[in-house]
Image (spheres, rainbow, N blue to C red):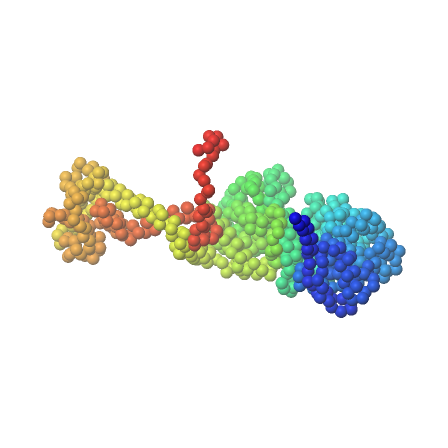
Amino acid sequence: MASAAKPAAPVGKRAKVGVKTPCGDLLLDLDLDLPLFTIVEYVCQEVGITEPDLYAIKYDGSEVYIFDANRQDIRNGDMLQLVRMPMNRNEVIEKLSSGTPDEKAEALQALLILAADPDSAVKFIAREGHKSIVSWIEVGVYKGNLLCRAIQCLQGLIDQGLVTWEIFSNKCLSRILKETNSANGTEWSNVEVFLSALECVVTSNPAAYETVFMGMPWERYAVLMQEASVVVMRNCIMLLNALFAQGSPGNRDALKNAISNWKIKSVVWTRLKNYGQVDSELAHALHVFQAQMLGLYERLRNARVDTADLALNGKVDILLKLAQSGLKSDDTRYKQLDFKRRLSVHHTAMGLEDVRVPLKDFAKPAGRLAIENLLYFADKYNLSFTTAIQENLFSSSEHMCPLVESSILLTELLCRVFRVGEPAGDEKTFLLMYFSHECFFEEVFSVCMLLVFKTWREMKASKTSIRKVFGIVNQQIVRALKLNPHCLDINSFRTTLSSLPYSEIVKQLQRENDERKASERQSRAVNQLRDSFRAEIISLVNENRINVLCKGSRFQKYGAKGNRIKDGYVFVKLSHNLKALHYGDCNATCDDVDIEELPESIAVSDIEMINTGASCPHARKAARQIVDLAFSIVICNDGQPLNLVAPNAKVLNRWLDGLNVLMGNAANSIEARGDMGILLDMEVRLRLLETEGIHIPETPPPIPPPPSNFDFSSRFFGSL
């Protein structure tokens, strides 16, 4: 019997690639299971290179090198390149410490390549090479370009997860800060690396915060952001964001003051308005900066108003004095006020209800922040402020715009719109106009306060409708931001707001409502939902019309020629068993008659048809308005018809609908169709309330296949 054949050895992974070398290009079939050094040695042998230790392979057109850890990623058709390393791997640490400046640069360049290789990085750290680099930075061995490369090498080791940013000592950071502070225009690429490293250190190592916070003067940030590259500006913003996020409340206040004093926002705005398209990293940095700076208002927003606080009472007194300064003593209307009225007029015009302790009116959520906003508005927009005071003074108390309450509501509204206090997310959106003004929030408050006054007048609002006014103001602000999301400055925002008066907002809301209804009508899924309860709605309308007949109505009597019979009325009512219509004479003040008091009756089963308009015998010679409201209940076998004239079209339609329902026909009047449409729309909206803003597919999702069995089980009752 023949012995069993041995299984074939597994075929290694291979790749057919092109390789560019200093001695010519090759097409090779590489065995990727071989060690990288063997592959490099093989390529060098193919082109006659005798020192494979000095060469490495990378992807052509990129700086991604191939190591043992990633050689399996090579695919058929890849284009590789054989490149000479700056120096032998074994000489890197020696040259880093004792080499000439050129040799140190070559060693750092080689290390920058090797740091991406996990095996080489582990060996380098095992020989404490990273500590050597840090110590050489501390003593000033590396400066300028060498320092930049040294930091990049350490960052490569950190990216491998082998060391952390804590390896940067305070002395090392001081050296980096010194280089950052002294760099000039020819070294901006180095500053980009320095700032990026400082930002990572602040984020990762709390112990290094104070060194970085105090190590670079605030004016240096302004200079770098104004004169250096856009990348340097971005890294400056990212460093400020890190200092802000990791800092104490005191540090944050210092940052806010420095940013304001050195006009850093203005520097950013000046560069951005001429920059054009902003890349995603810069956009995210600006988003975080904006969110954190606006978040500073959260403290005042949530602060409690202490009515015993002398400083706050002083600020309210300033507001009252500013309001008083706007009232002209020579105004005839002002002179006509008595002394008591003059004494309280300033409080009333401001909308203050508590005359003794006016600060109590601000003791509401966001009231503390509203005081600061109102002070800014009264100071910077004094003419508009005093004009509003004068309008309130000589308006009726009902239509007076409550300035204090409006300022609180507007402050809270702006906090929601601009997401004050919310943490920065991953968004890459920011408001360019935010950087156009040092006091952005207060300035926007002032612009929107003018909008409140304008909308108040347009709506002819009263105090009871203040919530409705702010609903419109909210729409105006939100729509203005959507209409012009890239407002250059606050003046552009003001112009956009002016294009959205109350009348325009009403038109847009109505149009959107109509479009939504039209979309719902065209949606197959919504129409199916509507049809599913159409019968129920029709039944509800029919029941309503029957109830109208059961309640009964009073009708004016008319003669055969269509003439009105004076003081002649007839009351008609349907029996509760829905089998007969009872009627009889009544007086002009009668609203209801017991069915037992109505002597005449018509069996519903005897009703042959219902005539309307000119078909009625009592309306043939009557005036047009009588013809339009006339109807006759025709009885079988030539019985005497009941001729009636409804007092108005509403009663006519409801009675005709009710009679048609009794006879088994549909209620088809315009009013009935309108009621059905309204009820159907309301029902659809209620059913779709939680799907607002969600796209409803035209076709339902496929029904999953049934389970393999129906042996259901309960944890309490076992198998069912």
Q: Quadrant of the C terminus?
A: top left
Q: Nearer the viewer, residue 390 or 66?
A: 66
Residue at the spot x=58%, y=49% of the render? 419
Judge left or right: residue 472 versus residue 82: left
Query: Which residue is most to the top?
Result: 717
Total count of labels? 0
Image point 22% across, 38% down: which residue? 576
| Image spot of residue 378 (x, y percent) | 59, 51
**Residue 44 in sight from this viewpoint:** yes
Identify whether 593 is placed above or below 375: above
Residue 579 relative to residue 503: left or right: left
Q: Indicate the quadrant where residue 437 lies.
A: bottom right
On the image, the x and y values in percent for residue 170 come to 80, 47
User: In this rendering, would 9 be left or right of 405?
Assistant: right
Q: Which residue is painted at 47% across and 53% down in the image?
A: 695
Q: Position of residue 318 (x, y in %)?
A: 61, 47
Give the residue displayed 71% in from the left and 48% down from the top: 203
Q: Nearer the viewer, residue 689 or 492?
A: 689
Kindly tell me whether residue 254 is visible in this rendering: no
| Residue at far front of view | 1
Residue 628 position within the rendered picture, expressed as x and y whole percent measured from the top left: 22, 55
Name the residue furthest left: 638
The foreground one among 403 and 173 is 173
- 131 or 683: nearer the viewer: 131
- In the image, is 541 to the left or to the right of 404? left
